[in-house]
């Protein structure tokens, strides 16, 4: 801590012209210890440094006071008088400002390094569990490969799985499971040609080859379906306490175990959203919602807000921060702690790239006004500023 007390004082004396020979020796020794120290020295002695740093730390009351004086003087006094005021302010404020600059710079570097090391955006990764229990890890570094399973040939690529149906007769249906961890996404093309884009922390159980009069899969989490049309074989997605039935369409389903509602958002075609004896028919641009009490409703929505994730974008419109952080935390694999419950109700409108650094996401969300994020490892603490 001694260097935080001494060096700012020596730097202020350089500006004010009161540095002794002995102090000059100590300052030169400090400058020679690192490139960063030398850079900071030259930053401090630049013309206009004090005024600039005062503006940057305007939350410090004493700085506010002096800068108000300076701004008023600028309106009525010549430049020579302004420089004198700044010089006087420097004698009192510079040690404080330099400490704030110095410590703040080091802390920002440490936080940036920590964020880069600990908090990473999601990527293409998944775990494939075959019907016999065999597990295969899948990811973006995966080289193309092909292996056979009863009823289909499976082509493994860097961007997803592709089930290529074969002509063999399948007497028994075999189910595989594709699991997407937190911080992951992956796609799969089923044996009928249906493409499923899967979001973080999701699981899809599906037959290696569809058999019978219907095509049924089981979903937990979130996925976007682009279903191949087949009027004779309806496509069903079974969720917790509900089912989505389609003929040929594109839609998004969000059905996470830790959320109170299940949402089906229709982009194209027509689907039936069913739960018990309740049913809603969705047309393009409509969303069906099933709440924890079993009640169902539908509403018109901007489908882009619910499907942009598969295009690499977070899109929100007057969305509560609590809901945003549920989505963001799955993708960046972070834990969220709310120090002020009121911050859950803060709303945000905007778009963010899913593959941006987490620090950029935080910066945009903090623009809501009075919200502050503190990052400790992969734990995010949210409070009122």
Image: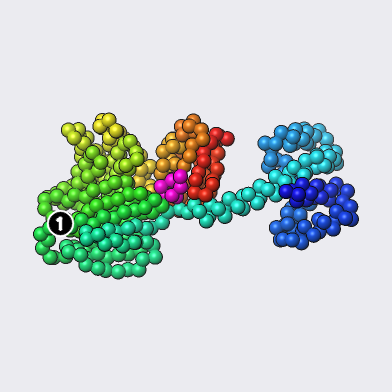
Q: From the top left corner, tell me how far across and down residue 360 is, in percent.
A: 52, 48
**Magenta-drawn stretch contains 284:** no
The residue lying at 32 percent from left, 46 percent from top is: 222
Residue 238 rendering spot, x and y as whole percentages: 22, 44
Query: Viewed as shown, does residue 61 lie left or right of 245?
Result: right
Q: Residues within 10 Å of mark 1 (few under 14, many from 20)?
A: some
The quarter of the rendered structure image containing the C terminus is top right
Magenta part of the chain: 328-335
Instruction: Give the tally of numbered discs.
Output: 1
Q: Is residue 227 above or below residue 76?
A: below
In this orientation, which residue lies closer to the viewer: 22 or 266? Answer: 22
- Say which element carries label 1: loop
Q: Is residue 330 magenta?
A: yes
Give the main secondary structure, helix, strand or loop, of the magenta stretch.
helix
**Residue 34 appears in which quarter of the rendering?**
bottom right
* Residue plotted at (47% across, 54% down): 120
């Amino acid at each position: 801590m001694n260097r935080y007390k001494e060096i700012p004082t020596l730097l202020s004396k350089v500006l004010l012209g009161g540095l002794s020979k002995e102090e000059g020796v100590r300052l030169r020794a400090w400058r020679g210890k690192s490139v960063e120290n030398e850079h900071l020295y030259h930053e401090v002695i630049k013309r206009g440094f004090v005024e600039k740093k005062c503006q940057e730390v305007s939350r410090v009351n004493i700085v506010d006071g002096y800068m108000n004086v300076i701004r008023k003087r600028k309106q009525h006094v010549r430049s020579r008088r302004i420089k004198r005021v700044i010089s006087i302010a420097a004698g009192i404020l510079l040690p404080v400002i330099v400490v704030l600059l110095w410590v703040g710079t080091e802390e920002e570097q440490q936080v940036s390094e920590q964020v880069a090391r600990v908090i990473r955006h999601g990527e293409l990764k998944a775990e494939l569990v075959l019907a016999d229990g065999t597990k295969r890890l899948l990811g973006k570094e995966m080289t193309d490969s092909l292996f056979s399973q009863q009823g289909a040939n499976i082509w493994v690529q860097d961007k997803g799985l592709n089930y290529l149906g074969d002509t063999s007769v399948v007497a028994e249906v075999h189910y595989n499971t594709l699991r997407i961890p937190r911080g992951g996404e992956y796609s799969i093309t089923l044996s009928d040609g249906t493409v499923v884009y899967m979001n973080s922390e999701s699981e899809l159980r599906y037959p290696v080859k569809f058999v019978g009069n219907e095509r049924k899969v089981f979903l937990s989490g979130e996925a976007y379906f682009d279903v191949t049309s087949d009027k004779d074989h309806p496509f069903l997605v079974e969720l917790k306490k509900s089912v989505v039935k389609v003929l040929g369409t594109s839609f998004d389903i969000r059905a996470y175990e830790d959320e109170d509602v299940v949402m089906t958002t229709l982009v194209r075609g027509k689907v039936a959203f069913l739960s018990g004896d309740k049913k809603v028919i969705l047309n393009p641009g409509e969303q069906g919602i099933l709440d924890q009490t079993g009640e169902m409703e539908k509403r018109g929505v901007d489908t882009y807000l619910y499907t942009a994730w598969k295009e690499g974008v977070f899109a929100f419109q007057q969305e509560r921060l609590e809901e945003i952080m549920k989505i963001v935390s799955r993708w960046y694999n972070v834990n969220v702690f709310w120090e002020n419950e009121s911050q859950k109700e803060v709303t945000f409108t905007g778009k963010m790239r899913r593959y941006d650094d987490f620090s950029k996401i935080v910066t945009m969300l903090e623009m809501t006004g009075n919200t502050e994020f503190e990052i400790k490892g992969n734990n995010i603490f949210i409070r009122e500023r």
